[in-house]
Image (cartoon, rainbow, N blue to C red):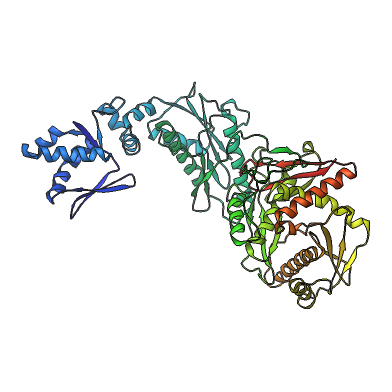
Amino acid sequence: MKVKLRADAHCAPVARGVYWSRAGRSFVLSGPPALYALVDDQLDALLEGTSVDAMVAAAGDEAARPVIEHVVRALVAQDVLIDLDAVKGPLPDPADARAHAGLLAYLEAHCSEPYEAFARVRAARVAVVGEGTAAEAVRRGLAAGGITRESDRPGLTVVVDDCDQPMDPDDAAVTPRPDAPVLPVAALADLALVGPVCATPGELRSFQALRARAADWQRTGDEAPAARPVSAVLAGSLAAHAVLTHLAGTSDGRRTALVVHGHAAQTTNVPLPEADAGTPWRAVDPDREPDLSEAEPETSDSDAGTGADATTDAGLQQIHRRAAGLTARWTGIARWGRDLDLPQLPVSLVTAETVAAPGPSAAPARDAFPAARGPHFLGWGDKRAAAGLTATLAVLRHRVAQEHTPDDGPGLPAAGLTRAHWLVDGLLRHAACEALTRSPGTPLTWDELESSTVRSLWSLLRDFFDLPVALRTHAVPGLDWTLCTAVHAATGEVLATQWGPSGLSAGYAALLAATARAQFEAAEKTAPQAPVLPPDPVGTWSLEVAPDRQIHDCLRQLRDRARADGLVPRARRLVRDAAVGELPLACGLVWLA
């Protein structure tokens, strides 16, 4: 039997025998203290490749054969030794093995069939398209790995777009095919990216979307840029290694890209969304009654929802876990603000900054987009998780507006936990115009607010924030929900306008929104914060805490009102972002036609 020790195997003497470790696994080969000496004497031969007969001869004692055979069988079974008599593929000749010792050692450490992989790597033909520092590093890395470069009919093409020598986006070599995939590399001025191997145009578009979003994150963030030429050289070296893992079959199979960032040129693995997942917009029929018992994906035209109750801590945590991708670094559409200095009493406050640049997320890369920061949104609630949900929904409405093009039709941006929440959000915002113009509203007095919580907010605005507030409610025929406006009692300035299932809940929502804004503005005097956008003309905060049945009753009433006026509700849902993938919460355009 001929065997060879895998290059990444390690051993050491222990009390019970010999300790072995390899590929993240370890075990003890039991035996007397002399066992380690027997193994240690044979290590050089095992690294070069040897046989049981040669090992017995080296031991100088035929009586050692049973022990050697036992050790060899045990180590072959543990995949520490390669059984050279059972491997697939031809063994490399000694000259080739010496010339490519590093490649061979890597394959012996990472491949179940290293010599078959060695032949495959040596036979491969790889082209490098592009110039600049990163492309030069790719070529050096391929040469060091024993991979042949060939420009005519290669099996794989590395496409390097370097900011110093940009690629022509119409270059035919950029278009991948199943028989000629592409590995994209982007060496930008302040960061670099190395993509996975892309076999279809859709997979390449997925990488380009990540490239654009990563540039957005770098452009709007505070992290120092990755220094050139270090980042470009590192990206080129990583790309050469990615070629090797692809050819050898040692990649983990996950579709991830590497981002090189920061002054220390650190690397981060970033998952890519599913390629060719369809159009980002989907028409939705608001008149279809959802089946609440259906457990369909949230991105379908169903209302199974998030399966979480936003009024409980556990439910809020579940919602935030589902929505974590919206703020994931390098791919998300927003980042959380630096809110450590924001007071959290009497209302919990959270800010979120939009990261994604204007325009559809599937648009071409925008490496040279102006370095302006995105708008900030203020979220509020009785706890930070609830405030985070409010900010998340505001960010989604903003994203809908960014993705919206004239070809997408009319509509108001809306968002919600479920399909029904989203539709009600949009239709209530439409109904607000009628509610506010029908009449000046009905005063909501202190005595009518039979709630200590609501009264305490009203008192806080007056006594602590020095904001005398008057509340006025507005009703719409055929709709149980009420609109409440909080105005400055002296100046008439509108502080907040909110819908609620009743006058009391609408008043609470309006006072809560006004208090959050006053609390944020007061904090700016002692701890300056990034400016946040003004509040929406009309808010629907109560939707986040209202029972599901109340939401669906409201949706039916809104549809009935529209039909009575000769109108039909229409909606288009934004179901995916090119960098995030499937959006976890419902959002899109809602209008009346």
Horizontal side, residue 41 vs residue 157: left or right: left
Residue 201 visible here: yes
Residue drawn at 64 percent across, 60 percent down:
337
Horizontal side, residue 374 vs residue 266: left or right: right
Residue sitting farthest toward the right = 439
Residue drawn at 71 percent across, 38 percent down:
281
Q: Quadrant of residue 242?
A: top left
Residue sitting farthest toward the bottom = 463
Compare residues 484 and 466 and report the one nearer the observer. Answer: 484
Asked if residue 593 is positioned above or below residue 439 in the image, the reply reads above
Horizontal side, residue 547 vs residue 80: left or right: right
Compare residues 146 and 538 and report the one nearer the observer. Answer: 538
Horizontal side, residue 243 vs residue 406: left or right: left
Q: Quadrant of residue 484?
A: bottom right
Q: Quadrant of the C terminus?
A: top right
Residue 61 visible here: no
Residue 485 in percent (x, y) is at 84, 63
Residue 483 in percent (x, y) is at 83, 59
Compare residues 133 and 278 and report the one nearer the observer. Answer: 278
Residue 401 in percent (x, y) is at 75, 46
Residue drawn at 61 percent across, 33 percent down:
276
Q: Quadrant of the N terminus?
A: top left
